[in-house]
Image (cartoon, rainbow, N blue to C red):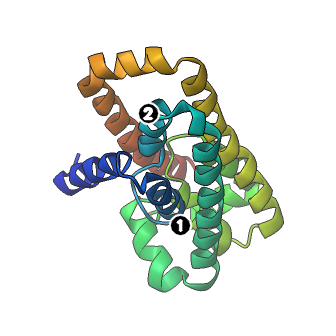
């Protein structure tokens, strides 16, 4: 992983222990849906483990902020693609085969939104693309709400019921878990390039 990505990763993880963590979670969730490379899950997990009684609030904040960030990504694609969208998509390797990616999005846009919203695929690539290709914004909102909400709610439920076991596992295997998280992050970037290549 690039050194600056690692620093950003560590910085984001550190936000989870701050008194203002819930506000930072909202900011990270918003930004991750439009340009930020680190997923909010990195904060959700330790925040829920530290205070399981706030799990519902944590999941709700992450979901709503992520959806709003997705709408901002949509706006970037719709109104500011050349100035803002192109550099972001270039960073994630999604501009090399732009025409093919557009064709693929036209055919499977709804599926791509759901998959990206629930998986490690960088969601901002899809939110920006949805705006560029004028995907119906109402349907985009509903699909984003469903996929992001299910993803974060599933994490919250698992942490609620298995919190102590999860805490023990993290304490024992922290280094391994950070490696897995890094692999998932990089794997998301690779997945976007693979999808573009298959278009």
Name the one closer to the observer, 80 or 47. Answer: 47
**Residue occupying image coordinates x 54% and y 80%:** 81
Q: Mark 1 points at which residue?
A: 98
Which image quadrant for residue 175? Answer: top left
Q: Is residue 136 visible?
A: no
**Residue occupying image coordinates x 37% and y 16%:** 168
Q: Earlier in the sequence, mark 2 or mark 1?
A: 2
Q: In this view, does 160 lie above or below 1?
A: above
Name the one closer to the observer, 94 or 22. Answer: 22
Name the one closer to the observer, 116 or 146. Answer: 146
User: Position of 184 compared to 51: left or right?
Assistant: left
Q: In this view, does 161 lie above or below 126?
A: above
Which image quadrant for residue 68? Answer: bottom right
**Residue occupying image coordinates x 63% and y 74%:** 132
Q: Which of marks 2 and 1 is in front?
A: 2
Q: Distance between the residues labelled 2 and 1?
A: 43 Å
Q: What element carries label 1?
A: helix
């Amino acid at each position: 992983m690039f050194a600056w990505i690692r620093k950003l990763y560590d910085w984001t993880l550190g936000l989870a222990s701050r008194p203002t963590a819930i506000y930072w979670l909202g900011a990270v969730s918003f930004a991750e849906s439009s340009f930020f490379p680190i997923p909010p899950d990195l904060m959700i997990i330790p925040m829920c483990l530290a205070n399981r009684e706030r799990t519902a609030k944590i999941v709700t904040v992450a979901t709503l902020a992520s959806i709003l960030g997705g709408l901002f990504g949509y706006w970037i694609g719709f109104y500011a693609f050349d100035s803002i969208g192109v550099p972001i998509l270039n960073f994630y390797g999604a501009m090399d085969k732009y025409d093919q990616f557009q064709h693929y999005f036209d055919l499977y846009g709804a599926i791509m939104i759901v998959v990206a919203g629930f998986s490690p695929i960088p969601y901002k690539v899809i939110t920006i693309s949805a705006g560029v290709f004028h995907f119906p914004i109402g349907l985009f909102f509903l699909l984003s709400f469903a996929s992001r909400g299910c993803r974060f709610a599933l994490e919250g439920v698992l942490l609620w019921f298995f919190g102590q076991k999860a805490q023990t596992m993290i304490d024992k295997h922290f280094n391994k878990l950070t490696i897995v998280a890094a692999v998932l992050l990089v794997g998301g970037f690779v997945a976007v390039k693979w999808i573009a290549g298959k278009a």
